[in-house]
Image (cartoon, rainbow, N blue to C red):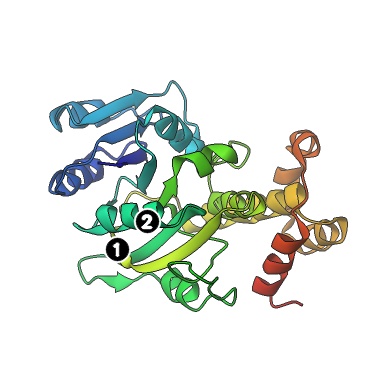
Amino acid sequence: MKTTVVIATRNRAGELARTLRELAGLRPRPPIIVVDNASTDDTAEVVRAAGPEVRLLTLPRNLGAAARNLGVTAARTPYVAFSDDDSWWAPDALAKAESLFDRHPRLGLIAGKTLVGPENRPDPVVELMARSPLGREPGSPGPAVLGFLACSAMVRVRAYSDCGGFDPLLHFGAEEKLLSYDLAARGWQLCYVEEIVAHHHPSPSRMPAARRRRLEARNNLLITWLRRAPKNCLAATVSAPPRAVAGAARRLPKVLRRRQRLPRAVEARVRLLEGKR
């Protein structure tokens, strides 16, 4: 196998057990790395019961989305497929992705088609990616995107490492957007490929929707401060909810030390997604 499956998890032993069973059915069976974000349930026991193909990395504290970075670092394959603890890949997905990565050396990330629940309903994000206004670059395997769902994404490890992976500053929420920007800024292609399928059965143990929206609002503001022009930063700050501004302001010193504006070509693509020219 050229692909390792990396799963970041926290206190979802039951869901993780099902995901590992589903992944165990893939042939050939890929190596799997589970990064445990300081769980207090039976996660370790579930991983040990899954067999020697599954490696456990136990963290002393919850790193959020950035826990995936440790899994990528530990992988010994050129490609990594991310799964959440409640998602898994279709039987032919990894082989198809490996073939595309092999044939397209500038391809840094593949966003797969996410089917939700036992009904296999396409996630609403799927249609947005399929109809991306960014079009399709000549010779690329699918429409260009500047966003994806982490539970159904595969990366070239060299590209991922090139931009540092998921930023720990965000912890959780909208982390895919910043990684997309940074991959594109370094010249890597990001494409949606409909033939590569992941299944997502959302866990009933989820962050409350209101809290998730607050975190995403804060992180979207942080991303703007990190990568966009001053006029964009001002407009985003004025329009953001007060709690998002307050949460982002506490992280402002780190933002200022790490701020790096997007290249003009990538900024133009972001503006196109925003409906601006």
Q: Earlier in the sequence, mark 1 or mark 2?
A: 2
Secondary element at tag 1: strand
Relative side of 52 to 120, left or right:
left
Q: In the rendering, at what x and y percent does residue 247 appear?
A: 70, 44
Q: Is residue 19 left or right of residue 123?
A: left
**Residue 187 located left or right of residue 36:** right
User: Which residue is label 1 attached to?
Assistant: 197
Residue 25, numbered label? none
- The residue under the point 29% across, 26% down is 56
Amino acid residing under circle 1: Val
Quadrant occupied by the C terminus: bottom right
- Examine the rendered structure and indicate whether residue 203 appears above or below residue 132: above
Neighbourhood count class around disc 1 (C-alpha, 10 Å): few under 14, some 14–19, many 20 upward = many
Counting from the top left corner in percent of width and height, residue 227 is at 74, 51
Residue 42 appearing in the image: no
63 and 247: which is toward the camera = 63
- Coordinates of residue 54 in the picture (x, y in percent): 22, 31
Residue 277 in view here? yes
Residue under label 2: 152
In the image, residue 216 above or below residue 48: below
Q: Look at the numbered discs 1 and 2 and tell me whether their residues touch, using CB distance below 8 Å.
A: yes
**Foreground of the two, 156 or 128:** 156
The residue at 61%/50% (across/down) is: 178
- Residue type pointed to by label 2: Ser
CA distance for labels 1 and 2: 7 Å
At numbered mark 2, what does the secondary structure look like: helix, strand or loop?
A: helix
